[in-house]
Amino acid sequence: MVAIVISVFSPIFAYRVGLTTIGRINLFTVLLFIGSWLFILTMGLLYNHPVSMLFYVSIMANCCFAIGNSVWFMHKRNPKASVKKLLVVLSFLTALCFVFIELMYPTNVLIDTLLQTVMLTVPLFVCGVIWVRFRQIDREPEHT
């Protein structure tokens, strides 16, 4: 649930950084996600239906946008933070989450494991970026 909330609010990161085009695309994918989710809630989950496939694609796209927007947000607010280093940290965290999911909830379907991995990685990474940013704000001197 936290990953979904973060994904819905991820266009804010893009707008704060100044990437309005990416923010608009992200907002469009959020609206697709909400629309397909409401359709699934009213009609029921049909696995072969195109709207159900749109739901899974949009949730994955929103999670990717949340991660990308938070990386750019962190890089823009702290130019010393290298995008490469942030992506290495993200890759390491994703690998750890994948191993954890495979050990705790083994499945034979790779897409389910990947979806669970993304749903675990997104909140950890984005909340980590927000926490680091709050720590930076605490260290800054007050402007009076």
Image (tube, rainbow, N blue to C red):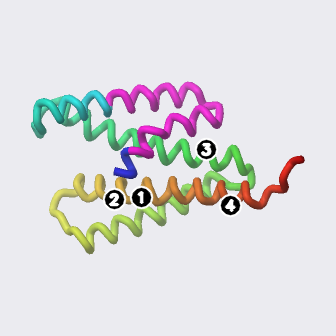
Q: Position of residue 12 (x, y in %)?
A: 55, 36
Q: Nearer the viewer, residue 108 or 137?
A: 137
**Mark 4 or mark 3: which is in front?**
4
Q: Label 2: few (<14), some or many (≥20) within 10 Å?
A: many
N-terminal label among 1 and 4: 1
Task: Report if the CB atoms under discs 2 and 1 are less than 8 Å apart.
Answer: yes
In the rendered structure, find residue 117 and report the number of the disc placed on it: 2
* Left or right of 29, for residue 87: right
Q: Position of residue 4 (x, y in %)?
A: 37, 45
- Relative to 43, does residue 9 appear above or below in the rendering? below
N-terminal label among 4 and 3: 3
Determine the image quadrant of residue 81.
bottom right
What type is the residue that disc 2 sits on?
Answer: Thr
Determine the image quadrant of residue 110.
bottom left
Span shown in magenta: 5-32
N-terminal label among 3 and 1: 3
Residue 41 is inside the magenta segment: no
What type is the residue that disc 4 sits on?
Answer: Arg
Q: SS at mark 3? A: helix
Q: SS at mark 1? A: helix
* Left or right of 33, for residue 134: right
What type is the residue that disc 3 sits on?
Answer: Trp
Q: Label 4: few (<14), some or many (≥20) within 10 Å?
A: few
Q: SS at mark 4? A: helix
